[in-house]
Structure formats: structure tokens, C-alpha cells
């Protein structure tokens, strides 16, 4: 007999399936709460109120589990997420404040000579991978993630 463990085959779950499992987990917690409350030998009215609310939650969880199971069997899935950020070649952008420290550390030497480098960038190319290639003036272009950029309004746009 072999001592090797069989690897469990990985199945990719759907968002609805994951949600259903989370609801099942809530149901298990409700059962634990009911057991814990039943083990307390007390009769205050507040405890009776909590116990009645647990009944309500338990019923709602059961209903939701059934509805999610039907939804999952129907094959429905939420639409894929898509980034709302869209940049075009020639658009003026800047590094987002959230990521500024990383870029300042990486371009420390360049920023000594050109302190506005991270604020005045132009989109040079949009790659298929989703990365954006930006450059400042005639400097060497460099790739940046979409989420690391913010749009900068052109001065011409502000005047009109």
C-alpha cells in the first residue's frame, strides 16, 4: 500500500457557490449560539428575546441557502469586474498619492533633477496586459499599473 496522499482535485468555485458556503457557515454559527444559550441556566426576558431572534436568523439562513442553491443550479454568475479606469495615448496622468512613496524611492536620483516627474506624465502606450506605459518629456518610458495612476486635467480644459 502506498503512503502517498491523494491530492484532492481542485474545482474552481463560482461566486454564488462561495456565497452559499458562507451562508452555510453562518447557519453553523447560529446552531452553536443556540446550543450555548440553551446551556445557560437563566430565564431573564432578554435571553428569551435573543433566543427568539436566533429563530428568526435560523429561518432566514435556511431560506437564503435554498434560494442560493437554486441560483447556483441555474448557472447564473455576476458579471466580471472591470476597471473603470481607461487611459488613452497622449492623456496627462500622475502617480496616485497612495503609491507615491514607492515611486519616489525607485526614482530618487531622477527626482533630484526633475521633482515634478511623477506629476506630469503622458500615456505613451496601453499594453494588452493592462499596464500603461508613461513618460515625461523625452525621458525613457516606464510601465505602470492602471491603479497607480490618476488623471490630470489639462490646463486647456480648466480654462474652457
Image (cartoon, rainbow, N blue to C red):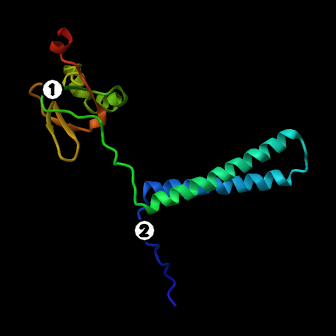
Mark 1, Cα crowd under 10 Å, few <14 / some 14-19 / many 20+, is some
Asked if 66 appears above or below 103 in the picture, the reply is below
Location of residue 72 in the rendering, given as x and y in whole percent from the top left corner: 46, 59
Location of residue 117 in the rendering, given as x and y in whole percent from the top left corner: 21, 23
Which residue lies at the image location 39% right of the left edge and 54% below the top edge? 77
Q: Nearer the viewer, residue 38 or 117?
A: 38
Q: Is residue 13 left or right of residue 131?
A: right
Distance from disc 2 to disc 1, alpha carbons, whole Å, reads 46 Å
Q: Secondary structure at mark 2?
A: loop
Q: Quadrant of residue 146?
A: top left
Mark 2 vs mark 1: which is more N-terminal? 2
Q: Secondary structure at mark 1?
A: loop
Which residue lies at the image location 68% right of the left edge and 53% below the top edge? 29
Location of residue 70 in the rendering, given as x and y in whole percent from the top left corner: 49, 60
Q: Is residue 71 left or right of residue 32?
A: left
Residue ID for mark 1: 136
Mark nearest the camera among 2 and 1 is 2
Amino acid at each position: 500500500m502506498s503512503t502517498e496522499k491523494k491530492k484532492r482535485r481542485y474545482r474552481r468555485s463560482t461566486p454564488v457557490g462561495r456565497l452559499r458556503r458562507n451562508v452555510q457557515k453562518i447557519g453553523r454559527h447560529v446552531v452553536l449560539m443556540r446550543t450555548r444559550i440553551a446551556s445557560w441556566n437563566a430565564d431573564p426576558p432578554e435571553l428569551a428575546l435573543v433566543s427568539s431572534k436566533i429563530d428568526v436568523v435560523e429561518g432566514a439562513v435556511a431560506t437564503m441557502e435554498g434560494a442560493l442553491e437554486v441560483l447556483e443550479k441555474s448557472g447564473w454568475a455576476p458579471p466580471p469586474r472591470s476597471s473603470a479606469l481607461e487611459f488613452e495615448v497622449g492623456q496627462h496622468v500622475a502617480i496616485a498619492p497612495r503609491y507615491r512613496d514607492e515611486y519616489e524611492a525607485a526614482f530618487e536620483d531622477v527626482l533630484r533633477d526633475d521633482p515634478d516627474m511623477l506629476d506630469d506624465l503622458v500615456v505613451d502606450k496601453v499594453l494588452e496586459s493592462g499596464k500603461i506605459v508613461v513618460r515625461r518629456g523625452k525621458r525613457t518610458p516606464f510601465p505602470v499599473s492602471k491603479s497607480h495612476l490618476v488623471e490630470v486635467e489639462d490646463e486647456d480644459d480648466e480654462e474652457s
